[in-house]
Image (cartoon, helix red, strand yellow):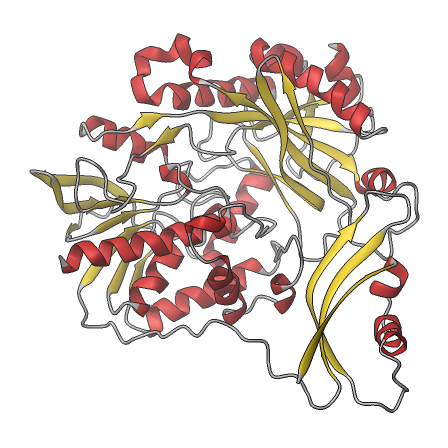
Amino acid sequence: MSHELSISISPEIAYTDGALEDFLRKELKLTASDFLDWRLVKRNIDARKKAIKVNLEIQYSLEEKLTPRALTIFNFKDVSTAPEVHIIGFGPAGMWAALRLIELGFKPIVLERGKDVRSRRRDLKAINRDNIVDNDSNYCFGEGGAGTYSDGKLYTRSKKRGSVQRILDSLVEHGAAEDILYEAHPHIGTNKLPKVVAAMRETVLKYGGEIYFETRLEDFKLEGNRISSLTTSDGKAWPINSLILATGHSARDIYHLLHRKNIRIEAKPFAMGVRVEHPQKLINKIQYHGNDYDELLPAASYKLVQQVDQRGVYSFCMCPGGFIVPAATEQNELVVNGMSPSKRDNSFANSGIVVGIEMEDLAPYKKHGPLAGLAFQQEVERLVWEAGGETQVAAAQRLVDFVKGKVSEKLNPSSYIPGLKSVAMHKVLPPFFAKRLQKAFVEFGRKMPGYLSNEANIIGSESRTSSPVRIPRNKETLQHPEIINLFPSGEGAGFAGGIVSAGMDGERCAEAAVEFYSS
């Protein structure tokens, strides 16, 4: 028989080998020879006060070994001769859509513009070392999408969109460590995600699904209110019945294609800003109240939000112990993103700090219709690229210098491999959100004393937080309101934000496509 115990203990006990079990035995009044089997159910660090505590929920048994942790049972079927559902994109939404189709007895046919995870590495190296951007194979495009080479953060607020537990269990099933099941803010790490993604691909292929890499959607044929066939970059035509569109938030060509075909898309609010990079030791010192926990506690993170002139300014995709990478999808743009290895042991902490962009801000771009936000996003990325010297060398400024409107004579060391160039970012960025960023940083410095420091760089642009375009769909059936066999899914459609929420949305769209197919 198992029991549960909730405790709040010091980091020294929680993270020192053997100390936690010694504490449990003392708490349960057991001797060293008494039987005890236990495991973590939930772990959360509470650093709100100077005396930091680690809150644990523990399952234990005093009589027999605990049964293995109960995971979702995925009943995959042989779908090699089953009815087909086509998926465009093999990022998180596309991957979980494919796996869910196999459970439901349907054959996924996946068309992915980029390369498999192993082949992508060469193209990522070319961006970092040679400033060469492959439009189809980069940090955004390829097997696993932008999520493959990321921190692998698995936190989501989208609890009503599906089963978070199914997504986490699926990741463990494909090789992720079990700690994602009990950490309050789980992550996998950029060094481990590629193997997990490759294992998911192998499951799709094992049960009869098909995946075609380096196969970009070029066009499609409409017959009435249905898409009847697709044409891909290799010239092949693909007859289809149901189509799940899971292309991610950076596939601008897909938005343009839909617009040319007069298929309804909508401009929507989004956010843009910069990456801020501090020494991790500085963030640890702030968040852990000066306690020297560098060798004991995980690298500290933060979450900041401030209303400035009727706009939200907030931290996004905070990466403790991480590094900044070039996330452009075209040669003449500068985009940065952050990621962390599983141990989060790099010497820098970085986070996006972004400003909400509303429809009224896009008035100068109204000639672009539903692509107004896309045009604005692209213009900013190009301005920053030009300021940085028209390579992947990033425009940057020291944080306090940015707030004071002063050009930095010297920049801090950075994890960003292509390098940094000192630029007057307060002049390069559009004034309406540069000024909000400046004001927000002052407030962040008050909320986190020590944060507003010239030990930090701001690096631009952090512009792919979410899609500036929504592909609408019916709330109940998830079909596009005009094209009945089109199921927009994930971040690219505007219905998710991160690995877990995109995975859940992919599963829902798979179920909706099957329902349509069967009707």
- In screen coordinates, is 182 left or right of 261? right
Along the line of sight, the residue nearer the viewer: 60 or 415: 60
Along the line of sight, the residue nearer the viewer: 116 or 287: 287
Along the line of sight, the residue nearer the viewer: 218 or 292: 292
Quadrant including the C terminus: bottom left
Using the image, determine if residue 168 lies above or below residue 448.
below
Quadrant including the N terminus: bottom right
Q: Position of residue 254 (x, y in %)?
A: 30, 35
Q: Position of residue 193 (x, y in %)?
A: 55, 58
- In screen coordinates, is 166 left or right of 370? right
Q: Position of residue 88 (x, y in %)?
A: 30, 49
Q: Is residue 411 visible?
A: no
The answer to which quarter of the image holds residue 13 is bottom right
- In screen coordinates, is 254 left or right of 430? left
The answer to which quarter of the image holds residue 326 is top right
Q: Is residue 253 visible?
A: yes
Residue at the far left: name it. 224
| Residue drawn where x is 18% and y is 54% of the image | 516
Q: Position of residue 512 (x, y in %)?
A: 26, 53
Using the image, determine if residue 414 lies above or below residue 354.
below
| Residue drawn where x is 21% and y is 36% of the image | 481
